[in-house]
Image (spheres, rainbow, N blue to C red):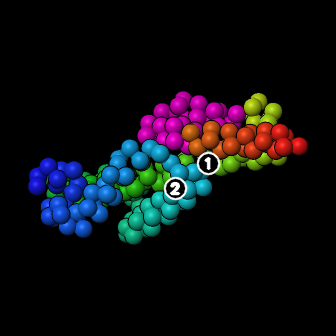
Amino acid sequence: YLSRALRGYTAANPDSAAFVTMQHAAFFRTCRDIRNPINLRNEKGAMQYLLNVVAAALEAYPCSLAQDVADLMDEDAYPMFSNRRHSKIQVRGEKEVLAHFALWAQTALDVIDVIEKERGQLESGKESSVNSNLQFDKVIQAMEDNDDIHFTILRYCSDVLGALRKDALQTIRRERESNLNCH
């Protein structure tokens, strides 16, 4: 039973339908699927949803992250080693995590906008504009040069969104070639 639990299976009877269904579902979904995006539209929707969820969570707090940072500077109101100070530190940490994911989502949405612009240029027949401009590459290079961008955000934009960009541009080129071959 322990080995099944470690693999994510229930401790149910292996002969039961629930166990078989659980095993079947676990077979197709792994942590590696996280790195395999479906398409650009799906990623854009997911990032917009993430941004909305994070914004709602941040709005639920009575004060901002900046206010928490300022409050912690006041050792009279928040004495060292006090429960009040430690709870403020905990809440500040929660807001920092939320702020990170908000930055991730907004950065990804901005990069997706660049990709969609390139896609639009290619669809309208301005391939030379896409090739000479390479806005995506410039954006990624600027992100790499910026020490304030967390490496997970950079890797997501470069690797995941870059792969989606490549697929989208190749699809447009293939469709154009097949249309030319048909005429």
SS assignment for the magenta stretch, majority: helix
Q: Residue at x 84, y 43 (%)?
A: 182
The picture quadrant where one finds residue 172 is top right
Amino acid residing under circle 1: Ile
Quadrant containing the N terminus is bottom left
Q: Residue at x 57, y 51 (%)?
A: 39
Amino acid residing under circle 2: Met
User: In the rendered structure, which segment of residues is drawn in magenta?
Assistant: 134-162
Question: According to the image, label 2 marks what residue?
Answer: 47
Q: Is 144 part of what is drawn in magenta?
A: yes
Of helix, strand and loop, which one carries label 2? Answer: helix
Cα separation, mark 2 vs mark 1, equals 10 Å
Q: Badge 2: how crowded within 10 Å, few (<14), some, or many (20+)?
A: many
Q: Is 53 part of what is drawn in magenta?
A: no
Residue 167 percent across, percent down from the top left: 62, 41
Residue 17 percent across, percent down from the top left: 24, 68
- Residue 106 seen in the current view: no
Residue 149 percent across, percent down from the top left: 48, 39
Residue extending furthest toward the front: 15
Question: According to the image, label 1 marks what residue?
Answer: 112
Residue 114 percent across, percent down from the top left: 67, 45
- For the residue pair 33 and 138, the one nearer the viewer reads as 33
Viewed as shown, does residue 113 lie left or right of 19?
right
Residue extending furthest toward the left: 1
- For the residue pair 127 and 91, the one nearer the viewer reads as 127
